[in-house]
Image: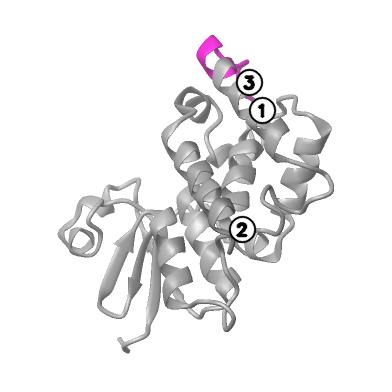
Amino acid sequence: MTLNSIYLYVGADYVSAFAMSAFVALKEKGLDFEIRTVDLKNKQQHGSAYREISLTRRVPTLMHGDFTLSESSAIAEYLDEVYPAPNYATVLPADREARARARQLQAWIRSDFMPLKSERPADRIYFPEPVKPLSDAAQLACEKLLSAADQLIRDDRYGVFGDWCIADTDFALMLNRLVACGDAVPLKVARYVERQWSRPSVQQWVNQTRD
């Protein structure tokens, strides 16, 4: 391993929303890195080898030389600090207030909407199958998510904070749980998801081989 080698540990099934976020951040930075997969279904993340790498025993985990870091939002912030503008693209907004709100959005997506995540799991985006109508709890989460989307998304802006940032990828994936499962969403939300999903860095993740 060389001093600046970068490795990204992701689930072998390539369905983790947070692994996708870290992957997209690295691609947007234009960095060379190697993917290493972790067999989550067989609990490889709890084995001694991965425990030494990942404090959280979760994916994604970034290894940069002899430094390791888990949690996708922490990885994005680290990459912006280690590979700053103007030599590298930024993955978080340059404006202080927009950057704070992007972090807010990322943290909210991670910590909330649990009933909706349970009934509209991210793997349905890649492996569609019929789903049941949302429960009352999931419907409430859906209404909260779409209310936020109505406030944040504008057709005259590429991303919710103007230019693209990594929070757009996270937000679009959360919304795509609904779109991919055939749930009704406003037209501007569908257009936003399509716009973000067509981004080359996102498509490189989407086109990974999945079993």
The correct choice, above or below, for 190 with respect to 80 in the image is above
Q: Main secondary structure of the magenta part?
A: loop
In the image, is residue 84 above or below residue 141? below
Amino acid tagged 1: Leu
Secondary structure under badge 3? helix
Q: Which residue is mark 1?
A: 146
**Residues at badges 3 and 2 in contact (C-beta under 8 Å)?**
no
- Looking at the rendered structure, the kind of residue marked 2 is Cys
The residue drawn where x is 56% and y is 74% is: 29
Q: Report how far apart the C-alphas of labels 3 and 2 lie in the structure.
A: 24 Å
- Residue positioned most to the left: 48
The residue that label 3 is drawn on is 143
Which region is colored magenta? 130-139
Looking at the rendering, which quadrant does residue 193 occupy?
top right
Instruction: Tell me if residue 126 can be seen.
Output: no
Q: Where is residue 155, by image quadrant? A: top right
Instruction: Determine which residue is flagged by label 2.
Output: 165
Of 87 and 7, nearer the camera is: 87
Q: Mark 2, residues whose alpha carbon is within 10 Å: few (<14), some, or many (≥20)?
A: many
Q: Which of disc 2 and disc 1 is earlier in sequence?
A: 1
Which residue does the image show at 32% across and 51% down from the upper left?
A: 58
Answer with left or right where residue 104 lies relative to residue 50: right
Q: x, y (%) of residue 67?
A: 27, 73
Q: Position of residue 80 (x, y in %)?
A: 48, 69
**Position of residue 195 in the picture relative to residue 40 (left or right):** right
Do labels 3 and 1 touch, CB within 8 Å? yes
Mark 1 falls on what kind of element?
helix
**Residue 83 placed where, x, y %?**
48, 78
Quadrant of the frame with the N terminus: bottom left
Mark 1 is surrounded, within 10 Å at the Cα level, by few (under 14), some (14 to 19) or many (20 or more) other residues, namely some
Circle 2: element type: loop
